[in-house]
Amino acid sequence: MLQDILTHLKEPVVLEGLAQVGAAAVLAALVVLLSRQRGLKLETELSVAFARGFVQIVAVGLVIGLLLAVPVAWSALILFGMVGGATWISRQRGEGLPGVTQVSFLAIAAGSGLVIVTMTAAGAIESTVRSLVPVGSLVIANAMKINGLALNRLKDELRDKRDEIEVGLALGGPPPAVLARHLRTSVQASLIPVVDSLKSLGWVWIPGVMAGMILGGENPVYAALYQFVIMAMIFAAGGLTSMLTSLLMGRRVITEAEQLRHIPASEGG
């Protein structure tokens, strides 16, 4: 196994890739510098995210290269680990919300899991490690992003509209009805990026999966169709995740006495 890793690292294309990473790092450093000059206080988070992303993606590349020969059952374990990581990252956007870790895990696992299982059964995802892990990771990662957006927006809604919500509850309004508009707002806001991506698909941008398939000699029409399938999977997983998150969290933010729980202010707010 160690010999295989060393073989991958010694290939000339790796040096070329590192040079390209260096160029990208210069651009990222520019963003960090501008953040500091404008007082955005994001330089630490941006720097850590960039460095962490580099280490993680290289590690995953090495691991996937080694796992291509293992039984397909390993895919489930790998994807489960990804769901765990996605939960830990996205939950931070809703820190302070009751049961945010459990809700995030259930929502991401259910939303992305249903899509992955369904599309594997439909033949859109091959039942191999080579296909399940990369495509599954796309679905899980986007479910993570949408879950984080939903939690962040819901937290802001509950904090900023607290007086309005408490008045509704005090007047005897059923908690689901009082919270409905705020939960709906969090779902709508979380889906804006993926909806905009669908609107601009093939017009403003050509996604990486389609571009890679075409460069690899695949039929352009089939590449376009498969890219749309990928985007549809991302949309479905994200939509299911955000809706489930809002549903579960809507029940947890209300006490048994039908009062709104305390929602801490956002960091820096």
Image (cartoon, rainbow, N blue to C red):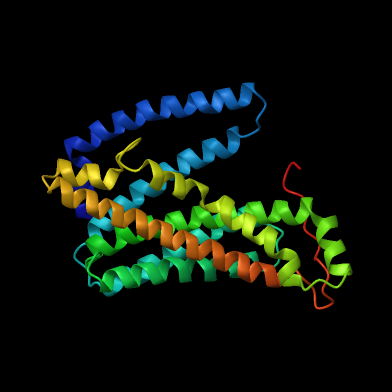
Q: Which x, y percent locates residue 212?
A: 21, 44
- Is 131 located above or below residue 227 in the figure? below
Q: Which x, y percent locates residue 263?
A: 77, 58
Q: Can the viewer see residue 183 in this picture?
A: yes
Q: Residue at x 42, y 62 (%)?
A: 236
Q: Residue at x 14, y 44 (%)?
A: 216
- Which of 190 and 15 lies nearest the eye of the viewer? 190
Identity of the residue furthest to the bottom in this view: 256
Q: Which x, y percent locates residue 246?
A: 62, 64
Q: Indicate left or right for 34 with 258 as reference.
A: left
- Is 71 located above or below residue 186 in the figure? below
**Which quarter of the rendered picture does the N terminus lie within?**
bottom left
Classify residue 249 by image quadrant.
bottom right
Q: Indicate left or right for 258 with 113 as reference.
A: right
Q: Residue at x 42, y 24 (%)?
A: 26
- Is 250 located above or below residue 95 in the figure? below
Q: Can the viewer see residue 67 in this picture?
A: no
Q: Indicate left or right for 155 with 110 as reference.
A: right
- Which of 152 and 19 lies nearest the eye of the viewer? 152
**Which quarter of the rendered picture does the C terminus lie within?**
top right
Q: Which x, y percent locates residue 219?
A: 12, 48
Q: How many marks?
A: 0
